[in-house]
Every structure is written in C-alpha cells, then in structure tokens.
Amino acid sequence: MPKCIVCGRFFHEGQGIIIKIPGGLLEFHSSRCAQRFLRMLLEERGSECVAREALELARGLRSSLERLEEGRAKAI
C-alpha cells in the first residue's frame, strides 16, 4: 500500500498520484499533497535548473495549446 510522502497517509493502489523518476517514486494520496510538494520544490529549493526547466516546459505546453486552439478555430 503506497504512502503519501507529504502527509504520511496510506492509500490504495490505483488511487492517488504516483510519479516515477530516476532513482525513486513520488507518491501522493491527493492532488493537494502533490501541489504542496511542487510548491515546496519550486519555492524553497528552486534552483536555477529547476526553474529553467519548469519555464521551458510551460512554454512548450502553451505552444501546444495554441496549436490546438488554432485547429479548433479553423474547423468552425
């Protein structure tokens, strides 16, 4: 049974959020705990490499959304 790394709560397989990263697993019982972890990572430990990668990922996601919206607009 996985255990949330933020609050320590146990949760059943198939529930919660489990992220596989090189070197281990990040296990969260709820999106709120995952959000808290991400906030702590970026605010307290936010080194330049993490911030740079996060901004690069955000740019990529925004451009994907723009392409999707353009495709929808042309279909109308």
Image (cartoon, helix red, strand yellow):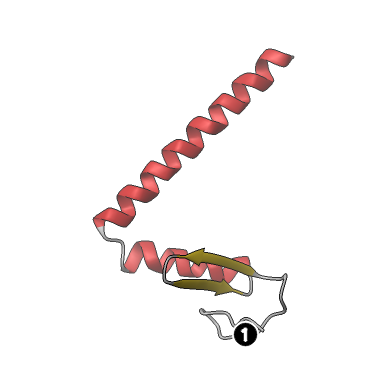
The image shows residue 5, relative to residue 75, as above or below, that is below
> On the image, numbered disc 1 is attached to which residue?
9
Quadrant of the image containing the C terminus: top right
Out of 31 and 26, give the one closest to the viewer.
26
The image shows residue 57, relative to residue 21, as above or below, that is above
Quadrant of the image containing the N terminus: bottom right
- The residue at the point 32 percent across, 68 percent down is 44
Seen in the image, is 50 located left or right of residue 60? left
Out of 42 and 21, give the one closest to the viewer.
21
- The residue at the point 25 percent across, 55 percent down is 48
Determine which quarter of the picture holds residue 18.
bottom right
Near mark 1 (Cα within 10 A), the count class, few <14, some 14-19 or many ≥20, is few
Disc 1 is placed on an element classified as loop
- The residue at the point 54 percent across, 67 percent down is 34
x, y percent for residue 53: 35, 49
Residue type, numbered disc 1: Arg
The image shows residue 46, relative to residue 29, as above or below, that is above
Seen in the image, is 51 located left or right of residue 34? left
The image shows residue 30, relative to residue 10, as above or below, that is above
Determine which quarter of the picture holds residue 10.
bottom right
x, y percent for residue 30: 63, 70
x, y percent for residue 72: 68, 21
